Image (cartoon, rainbow, N blue to C red):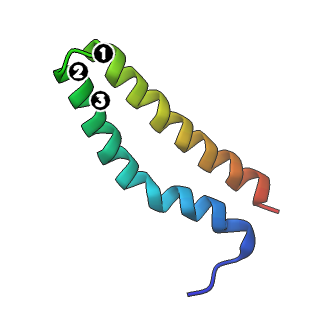
Amino acid sequence: MKFEKKYVAILGLAMSLPSMIVVLAYAAYRLSEEKILHPYLAWGIFLVIISYSLYMMVNYANKRKN
């Protein structure tokens, strides 16, 4: 399967998103379980990273649209 060069970064972010969610959820769970971070802070960091990833996908897509 061949992709246009301008969409490679977007596809890379989109394809890594599910595994990133799993790894970050596990890390947030372990950090809160071991009492290294407060649970709200751990899940807040999780949400910020996921939100930023989605923002970057949309941002790259809008820049490369034309």
Side of 41 where 39 appears, left or right: left
Q: Give the residue at x 33% y 24%.
A: 43
Q: Mark 1 points at which residue?
A: 37
Which label was assigned to residue 28? Answer: 3
Quadrant in which the C terminus is drawn: bottom right
Structural distance between the alpha carbons of marks 2 and 1: 5 Å
Most foreground residue, 8 or 55 = 8
Most foreground residue, 59 or 12 = 12
Alpha-carbon neighbours of circle 2 within 10 Å: few (<14), some, or many (≥20)? some
Amino acid type assigned to the residue bearing label 2 in the image: Ser
Q: Quadrant of residue 33?
A: top left
Most foreground residue, 19 or 33 = 33
Residue occupying the far left of the picture: 33
Residue 18: give x, y in percent of width and height.
Answer: 37, 54
In the displayed structure, 13 sits above or below 24; it is below
Asked if the residues shown at circle 1 and circle 3 are in contact, with their CB atoms under 8 angstroms apart, the answer is: yes
Asked if the residues shown at circle 2 and circle 1 are in contact, with their CB atoms under 8 angstroms apart, the answer is: yes
Amino acid type assigned to the residue bearing label 1 in the image: Leu
Secondary element under disc 2, as helix, strand or loop, is: helix
In the displayed structure, 11 sits above or below 39; it is below
Q: Give the residue at x 73% y 51%.
A: 62
Which label was assigned to residue 32? Answer: 2
Q: Earlier in the sequence, mark 2 or mark 1?
A: 2
Q: Give the residue at x 28% y 12%.
A: 38
Asked if the residues shown at circle 3 and circle 2 are in contact, with their CB atoms under 8 angstroms apart, the answer is: yes
